[in-house]
Image (tube, rainbow, N blue to C red):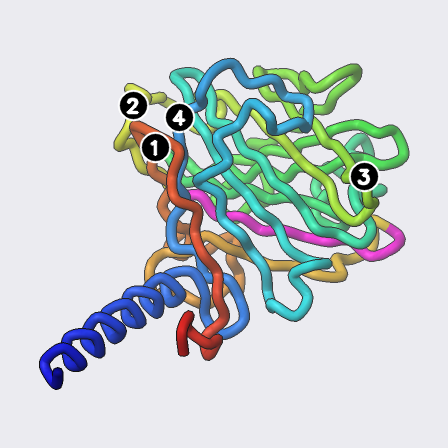
Amino acid sequence: MIATRCSVSALLLLAAGANAADVAANMIGRQSQNEGLSVVPAPGAVAIDGDLADWDWSGRNWSFADTAIRDRYSVESAAMWDAKHIYFAAKWRDPTPMGNMVDATFAPNDGWKGDCWQIRVQADRISHLTSWHFTEQARATMHITHAPGGGGDPQFVVQASDGAELGRGIAMAFRKDADGKGYTQEVRVPWSVLYEKPPAIAAGLTIRIGCEFLWGDPSGKNWPTHRYADNMQPGVTSREFYWQNTESWGNATLLAAGKLTPRRYVAAGSRLPGS
């Protein structure tokens, strides 16, 4: 009987340890700590329309600064790949969804001052993709620079005139949630934008991708109300000067297959099942 109890206790400890490891891999305290992005293969043709019905959403990361406010300020983001493109999608929780009054015609470098997703990529060169929905004209807009620190030349802006196509093979679409408390953003970027000399695109390819999520104030153009940076290198927790700290951007690896087991996010100190 003692041996049986010891065995059961050992199994419970192992289960608790596995659960704790799972938690530690995705959170620090009450904030998310994603260390790597799983880029799954696109299951078929992807329509850039803000509807993710044609997505494999299983590799998603959930990013938030505090569990207490993640129902209002958080983002679930994911990526997929095929031979020509990498695809990004985000489901935002945002009390003022798609609020960005920055007109790239006059202030191309200021998109980050409203609701905005900044995707930072290290391939064979650095790319900073600042993307937003210009509220006044309902136009999907992206500013791209390959300058290491995120500012300066070379840089260019692509913007939708009608539909999702922005130019240079880039496409982006937004769709507001029915409850008015969030929105979906969907992006397609050619590998040729990220790479100066694209390699053979295949499973196993790893680049670095960092994400900065910004929520604008009511003006949509003055200063973000909330910000969070995520996808980190293992053990790196500082998010200061994230835009230029390429060593903190997490790995993004192209996988051969999708339909992954989604990540779990449980705050440290939460009760374990059965305890």
User: Do the residues bearing badges 4 and 1 touch, measured as CB atoms within 8 Å?
Assistant: yes
Percent position of residue 223, x then y: 78, 57
Q: Secondary structure at mark 3?
A: loop
Q: CA distance from mark 1 to mark 2?
A: 7 Å
Task: Tell me how far mark 4 sits from mark 2, CA to CA.
Answer: 10 Å
In the image, which disc is placed on residue 102?
A: none
What residue sits right under mark 1 in the picture?
Answer: 254
* Residue position marked by numbered label 2 in the rendering: 202
- Which mark is first along the chain, 1 or 4? 4
Q: Secondary structure at mark 4?
A: strand
**Identity of the amino acid at label 4?**
Pro
Instruction: Judge whether residue 271 is colored magenta.
Output: no
Task: Determine the CA span between mark 4 and mark 3.
Answer: 29 Å
Q: Is residue 217 magenta?
A: yes
Give the quarter of the figure containing the C terminus.
bottom left
Closer to viewer: mark 4 or mark 2: 4
Measured in 3D between alpha carbons, the distance from the residue under mark 4 to the one under mark 1, in whole angstroms, is 7 Å
Q: Residue at x 61, y 29 (%)?
A: 52
Q: Amino acid at mark 1?
A: Leu
Residue holding disc 4: 41
